[in-house]
């Protein structure tokens, strides 16, 4: 069986980068499982909340550079680390179901480009991140083993 490794690959074609973002399978967020399964290397991750209608709602998409994916995802699901009262309230709800997925990369510039691309696609009217500014244009293809794509 073909295994998809959760990594970001960059290929240059005609002087323009094409990122291939392969996500890990979507997993229910549990701090113990995160400790066992998520690597302590840099990458990007998405955090989702399951609503009452069983739809996934994107809470955040961001990069993890310092501390790596493991510690950043653990911190993202811990209500005790939140200053924002609205985010803290969401995380303290006993009935909340959080899910995450990630992809690894050791290039900070590539992480900035990928997160910028995702933000500009998901939230075109509210982009709060910047690309690396290394390229005028770039392209991104997403792959997910469970075929979960947020915009579909």
Image (tube, rainbow, N blue to C red):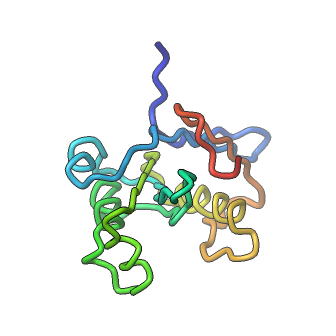
Looking at the image, which is closer to me, 131 or 149? Answer: 149
94 left or right of 106?
left
Residue at 27 percent of width and 41 percent of height: 37
For image coordinates 61% across by 59% down, the residue present is 113
Q: Up-down: is 24 above or below 100? A: above
Q: From the viewer's perspective, tell me whether residue 103 is left or right of residue 121.
A: left
Q: Where is residue 70? Give x, y as percent.
A: 29, 54
Tell me which residue sits at (75%, 69%) in the image: 124
Q: Where is residue 128 drawn, in percent x and y?
A: 62, 77
Q: Kindly identify the residue that appears in the image at 60 percent across and 73 percent down.
A: 129
Residue 146 on image: x %, y %:
53, 33
Q: Nearer the viewer, residue 89 or 95?
A: 95
Looking at the picture, does residue 17 appear above or below residue 61? above
Residue 47 place in picture, x, y as percent: 46, 59
Q: Is residue 151 left or right of residue 96?
A: right
The image shows a total of numbered marks equal to: 0
Q: Between 120 and 145, which is closer to the camera in this rendering?
A: 145
Image height of 52 relative to 27, above or below: below
- Name the residue nearer the viewer: 90 or 127: 90
- Toward the top, the furthest residue is 1
Q: Residue furthest front?
A: 52
């Amino acid at each position: 069986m073909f295994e998809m490794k959760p990594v970001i690959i960059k290929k240059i074609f005609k002087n323009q980068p094409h990122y291939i973002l392969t996500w890990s399978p979507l997993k229910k967020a549990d701090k113990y499982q995160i400790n066992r399964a998520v690597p302590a290397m840099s990458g990007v991750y998405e955090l989702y909340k399951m609503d009452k209608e069983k739809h996934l709602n994107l809470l955040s998409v961001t990069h993890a550079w310092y501390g790596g994916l493991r510690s950043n995802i653990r911190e993202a699901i811990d209500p005790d680390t939140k200053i924002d009262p609205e985010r803290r309230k969401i995380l303290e709800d006993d009935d909340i179901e959080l899910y995450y997925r990630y992809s690894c990369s050791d290039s900070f510039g590539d992480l900035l480009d990928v997160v910028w691309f995702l933000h500009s696609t998901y939230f075109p009217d509210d982009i709060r991140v910047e690309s690396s500014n290394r390229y005028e244009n770039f392209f991104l293809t997403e792959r997910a083993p469970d075929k979960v794509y947020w915009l579909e």
